[in-house]
Amino acid sequence: MTKVLDMPVAQGRALLERLVFHGIVFNMSWEDPEMDRQALRITPRDTVLSISSAGCNPLNFLCQNPRRLICVDGNPAQNAILELKLAAIRALDHATFFDIFAARRPSVITRVYRPYLRPQLSPRARDFWDKNLWMAARGIYQFGRMGLFCRLLRRFLRLLDLKPQHIETFFDLRSLEEQAAWYRKYAAPKMWGPWARRFVMFPPLLYLCGVHPTQYRLVNGRHNMYEYVKERVEYALTRVPIYDNYFLSLAVTGRFRGRRVPPYLLEENFETLRENADRVLIVNGWLGPFLDTQPESCIDKFNLLDIFDWMTPALLESTLRSVLRTARIGATLIFRSGSYRLDLPAAITPYVESHEELARQLLARDRSATYGSFYILTVRGKPGLHTPSDHQTQQDQHREVLAAAVS
């Protein structure tokens, strides 16, 4: 059974959970694992911390043989997906695992859940899947907030008369020149107009795909959300090879194509995942408060997704101080932003080195096209060491700032 830690949840968060992050939001992680692999360069000596999301990111890291993997998410439903995947890795063969989580024959999970998977789940995850196994059985990528958004997106593309046969052809193109020609002929004349503007500028639709309300205001206020989405879509369709872009294939066609899947689903990585499954700790809770319970200088690599986009300045600085406290000197942090620019607090910048050129190069190959910027930092120092009383004060401050941010 996977080790699971339940942290206290800040008061005042329930409303935000109901509106945006309650239940399954992400049925798949939308961070390109090749970017993360090259940025983090995980070694067998490393303790890695990642936001769980739908479990894809952590499992892709587990393929790289870290010494320890910590997966943190404030939404227990997201961790329930990761627990189910880890249980399947331990108990099933690769073919059955692939049938379920590549959604080829997902209904097989109804046959294996109770005898093989359920006994390995934590009580919280067991309760979740006892009630919601039907989603996994019908194909997890059709459900959750992201699944609903993608179904609406596919329906919208049909209303624009983007024909399925043309879309199917697009995902087998093998050159950027062919992609650009396809885009100019089939997509561009139909996609960008008044209806697309209404679709993109209706905030609840973007909340479905995990855009936090604060993040929406950030991007729309700086860049205009319609222009931002148009730029990101044009970039994905014309400047990044589409052939192995499983992100867009799943979103636009509802399925993966052959072996064009996340690394953790590949057969050659399955035994490594099984051997490493006991190295995982899953944390139901917020990042900062969890880190404040950990020893200093205990983590080597951090994958923090886009969590800073929705934080207040006070919470952002408080969280980064907790990250720096638990990071070893030389540790690597990666994170993303929906905005084209995210500035770190002035109090933090003296202690990190930013690798801007490498981050730009990797972002230029990003298949998901979800984010406007990517950041790679190396920890070079620490703001100061905490005494035990300082440590408790930091935890109290986290709870206060977090409660204020979400109420």
Image (spheres, helix red, strand yellow):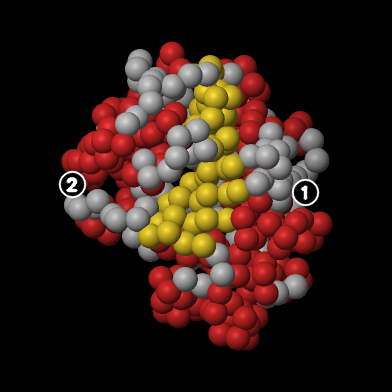
Query: Which of pointers 2 and 1 lies earlier in the amino acid sequence?
Result: 1
Near-viewer residue (307 or 256):
307
Residue 93 x %, y %: 75, 73
Q: Residue at x 68, y 40 (%)?
A: 45
Residue flagged by tag 1: what amino acid is it?
A: Asp
Residue 135 x %, y %: 50, 73
Residue 166 x %, y %: 69, 51
Question: From the viewer's perspective, is residue 56 above or below residue 2?
Answer: above
Residue flagged by tag 2: what amino acid is it?
A: Ser
Residue under label 1: 172
Res. 230 mark: none
Secondary structure beneath dot 1 equals loop
Q: Residues within 10 Å of mark 2 (few under 14, many from 20)?
A: few
Horizontal side of 391 relative to 267 (left or right) equals left
Residue under label 2: 407
Horizontal side of 46 relative to 175 (left or right) equals left
Q: Residues within 10 Å of mark 1 (few under 14, many from 20)?
A: few
Q: Residue at x 38, y 60 (%)?
A: 6
Q: Residue at x 43, y 43 (%)?
A: 294
Horizontal side of 10 relative to 104 (left or right) equals left
Whether residue 307 is visible here, answered yes or no, is yes
Front disc: 2 or 1: 2
Q: Residue at x 35, y 17 (%)?
A: 347
Q: Quadrant of the N terminus?
A: bottom right
| Mark-to-mark CA distance, 2 and 1 | 47 Å
Question: From the viewer's perspective, is residue 338 above or below residue 257?
Answer: above
Residue 329's quadrant in the figure? top right
**The residue positioned farthest toward the front in the image shown:** 388
Residue 146 x %, y %: 46, 56
Question: From the viewer's perspective, is residue 345 above or below residue 291?
Answer: above
Q: What is the total number of numbered labels drawn onto the structure image?
A: 2
